[in-house]
Image (cartoon, rainbow, N blue to C red):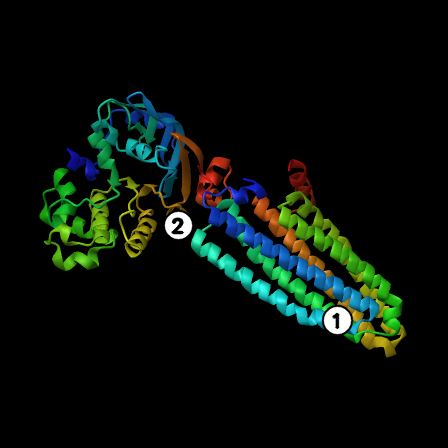
């Protein structure tokens, strides 16, 4: 049975409705914070703004606190409500998604560290490419978070394809940076930081894709993770 | 009469209409097939066209809100409604392996109760000793050999996981046992006559969590030996103990399927609303 967002407020227990609402609200807050973190980390990298990078690194503790709070809320939900069917799938999805968002926070921090340690020729040559990749990852992650908050399984299914494009672009950037290191070995340190940044962005996108996959599961009770493209297309068409 | 209905006697009797078995071609896993079952209390139709299969050596749970007909349905299986005036069955319950329609007028309800046992919400031991509670059904079915009765009583008490607790006091009155022990004694009483199907009508609703856990473990072990149909208001219990779950509402079978599927991704909105607390 498909889970609709309106169903969250249809329990006989108003308290149960409020608790589910609160959990979704907290996931949204945590997701927004992590997206802000990545946005600031990319800005720090682009502008070589060390102060902003340090702020990003420090603010990761807030992400970790939100993770602990959501873990506790989900534990309480399991103990007190013993959710079933769509509610169970949703709480299960939140438990998984929170881990992904926390890892996205760590990766934003990693990009901020690259901003602190990268400068010079690699940055001048590849800065805009990394910024473009970062913008794509941000856009994909915003869609994934929006799909989660809206319980939009169709939008979630589309994100998987977008993530593949990001993975391909990241591979290309990494290959270019490796060639750059071969040509200018004296800039190896800075170039390696950009490779780390690119890989962190690619991993960030992977976790965003996971977020989309879990809301698809919560909505339809169907695993998107190992679904073929054809099967996914059929599901989306049927939805 | 009531006492007889509250206990279980499982003398296997060759039914007159057992010849229908061949025409139904029962699968090896099918224990009972419910076909177009209707039931009326006077003019009030309590069950409406129920169609369902009960698999052998499996636990099937019946869930649904109060008044949905799940206990009425359960009681059809051992013809309990025959005790009430102005009630009427429609349709069939074909019991395997012989394919006899246990609702047929030609089938004696006492014979049905010999093959299909029942355990009730509240433990209802007889005002007899622990031993005699379990031996009673054996004596009723004509067993006289003391040694064989003693062996069978011990076996039933072991199967009901209560032997170790009562072996030293078999002559004590059954009422001296705790509620959980009394319920397991009632299960032993039902098992003594080797029923093919065991009906549980909210068997743990009067028990504490420990006694409930004991009964649930027991149900899990018993299904190897006997097919089980259980009515429960506790949906977590249905999820824990059953292989299949049937959701009923207003006398109709709304959804029936593997328990894991019903509780994680039900097919019908009414089921989803009920098990997630949105019913009303």
User: In the rendered view, does B239 fall on the left or right side of B20?
Assistant: right
Q: Percent from the top left, x then y, of residue A4?
A: 58, 42
Please say whether residue A225 is visible from this viewpoint: no
Query: Could you tell me residue B174's position as x and y percent?
Result: 14, 50
Q: Are marks 1 and 2 on the same chain?
A: no
Quadrant of the rendering where the N terminus of chain A is positioned: top right
x, y (%) of residue B66?
Answer: 35, 36
To which quarter of the image does residue A48 belong? bottom right
Q: Is residue A218 above or below residue A98?
A: above
Tag in front: 1 or 2? 1
B155 left or right of B277 in image: left
Q: Which mark is residue A53?
A: 1
Q: Position of residue B228 (x, y in %)?
A: 32, 42
Question: For mark 2, what is the residue?
Answer: B240
Q: Quadrant of residue B244?
A: top left
Above or below residue B145? Residue A62 is below
Q: Secondary structure at mark 2?
A: helix
Is residue A74 visible in this depiction of the protein?
Answer: yes
């Amino acid at each position: 049975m498909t889970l609709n967002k309106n169903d969250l407020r249809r329990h006989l227990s108003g308290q149960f409705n409020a608790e589910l609402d609160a959990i979704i609200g907290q996931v949204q807050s945590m997701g927004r914070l992590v997206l802000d973190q990545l946005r600031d980390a990319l800005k720090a990298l682009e502008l070589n703004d060390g102060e902003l990078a340090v702020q990003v690194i420090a603010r990761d503790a807030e992400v970790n606190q939100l993770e602990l709070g959501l873990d506790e809320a989900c534990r309480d939900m399991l103990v007190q409500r013993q959710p079933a069917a769509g509610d169970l799938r949703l709480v299960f999805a939140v438990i998984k998604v929170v881990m992904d968002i926390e890892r996205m926070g760590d990766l934003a921090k990693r990009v901020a560290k690259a901003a602190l340690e990268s400068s010079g020729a690699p940055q001048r040559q590849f800065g805009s490419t990394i910024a473009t990749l970062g913008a794509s990852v941000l856009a994909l992650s915003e869609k994934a978070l929006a799909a989660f908050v809206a319980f939009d399984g169709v939008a979630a299914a589309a994100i998987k394809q977008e993530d593949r494009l990001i993975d391909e672009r990241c591979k290309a950037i990494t290959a270019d940076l490796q060639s750059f290191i071969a040509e200018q070995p004296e800039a190896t340190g800075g170039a390696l930081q950009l490779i780390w940044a690119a890989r962190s962005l690619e991993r960030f996108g992977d976790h965003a894709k996971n977020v989309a996959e879990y809301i698809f599961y919560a909505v339809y009770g169907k695993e998107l993770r190992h679904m073929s493209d054809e099967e996914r297309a059929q599901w989306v068409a049927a939805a | 009469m009531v006492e007889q209905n509250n206990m279980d006697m499982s003398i296997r009797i060759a039914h007159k209409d057992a010849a229908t078995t061949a025409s139904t071609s029962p699968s090896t896993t099918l224990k009972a097939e419910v076909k177009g079952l209707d039931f009326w209390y006077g003019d009030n139709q309590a069950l409406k066209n129920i169609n369902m299969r009960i698999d052998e050596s499996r636990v099937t749970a019946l869930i649904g809100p109060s008044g949905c007909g799940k206990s009425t349905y359960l009681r059809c299986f051992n013809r309990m409604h025959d005790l009430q005036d102005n009630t009427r069955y429609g349709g069939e319950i074909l019991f395997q392996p012989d394919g006899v329609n246990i609702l047929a007028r030609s089938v004696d309800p006492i014979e049905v109760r010999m093959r299909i046992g029942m355990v009730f919400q509240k433990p209802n031991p007889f005002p007899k000793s622990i031993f005699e509670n379990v031996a009673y059904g054996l004596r009723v079915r004509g067993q006289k050999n003391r040694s064989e009765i003693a062996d069978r009583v011990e076996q039933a008490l072991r199967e009901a996981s209560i032997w170790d607790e009562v072996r030293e006091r078999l002559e004590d009155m059954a009422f001296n046992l705790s509620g959980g022990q009394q319920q397991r004694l009632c299960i032993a009483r039902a098992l003594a006559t080797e029923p093919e199907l065991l009906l549980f009508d909210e068997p743990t609703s009067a028990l504490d969590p420990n006694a409930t856990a004991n009964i649930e473990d027991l149900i899990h072990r018993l299904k190897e030996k006997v097919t089980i149909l259980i009515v429960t208001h506790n949906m977590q219990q249905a999820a824990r103990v059953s292989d299949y779950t049937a959701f009923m509402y207003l006398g109709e079978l709304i959804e029936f399927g593997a328990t894991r599927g019903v509780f994680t991704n039900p097919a019908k909105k009414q089921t989803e609303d009920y098990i997630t607390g949105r019913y009303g």
